Image: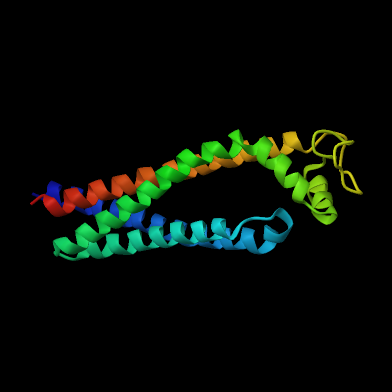
Amino acid sequence: MHHKSTVKKTFKVLFFFIQALGFISGIGVSIVGTTIYATAHEILQIPTKMLMLSYVLGILEVLSAVLGYTALASRRRLRMFVYISTTLILMNVQAIMAVKSTVIHERSRAWADWRWDSLNEEQRNFVQSKFKCCGFLDSSDRSGSSCGGSDGCVDAVYKLSKSTASLMQRTLMFSFFFESVGMGILSMLRLRK
């Protein structure tokens, strides 16, 4: 009997840790999304849709964590149902984002060419100085007034988009894993006598 209560306490602590991780990451996603948008949206022409997406993801993560705490503390099945439903919605959004993130670097060359045409002089100079490049394909292709290097910016943009997509996928799968483990632990704790 004592062994069973120790295992149950261990799973409760693990569940609370997972919920705390979800809560903190939800707040972190919102803060990072806001910071990136506030500091670079004009220069890099980041759409407002990306900010809203980070808010939706952050709110869902925080909501899932809070509902997880209340579902474990309460004996009502409705709270457990709401927690599982919210977490499943969050996990589906994360899965969609992970699949869509592969499109980021697949389309980055065409997107970058289209975006490069719409940049003004200040924006081109900013990108060239940050990536230490000059022009789009090479220094003679639509370069700004000041160049940061001799190579074109297309390769730097492609490498950045590939690393961003990879980081995004790993982060989303990490969260997805912990959320599914959290649902499994809660189900085990609540449904087992």
* Colouring chosen for the image of the structure: rainbow
Q: Position of residue 138 (x, y in %)?
A: 84, 33
The residue nearer to you, when weighing 173 against 48, is 48
Tell me which residue sits at (37%, 52%) in the image. 90
The residue nearer to you, when weighing 141 against 37, is 141
Q: Position of residue 191 (x, y in %)?
A: 12, 51
Tell me which residue sits at (40%, 49%) in the image. 93
Q: Quadrant of residue 165?
A: top right
Q: Is residue 35 left or right of residue 19?
A: right
Judge whether residue 166 can be spotted in this image. no
The residue nearer to you, when weighing 11 against 157, is 157
Q: Quadrant of residue 134?
A: top right
Residue located farthest toward the right when viewing the structure as drawn:
145
Q: Is residue 10 left or right of residue 106?
A: left
Q: Quadrant of residue 62?
A: bottom left
Tell me which residue sits at (24%, 46%) in the image. 184
The residue nearer to you, when weighing 69 against 17, is 69
Judge whether residue 48 can be spotted in this image. yes
Tell me which residue sits at (63%, 40%) in the image. 161
Q: Is residue 25 above or below residue 142?
A: below
Q: Is residue 151 left or right of residue 77?
A: right
Q: Position of residue 119 (x, y in %)?
A: 77, 51
Q: Position of residue 146 (x, y in %)?
A: 91, 48
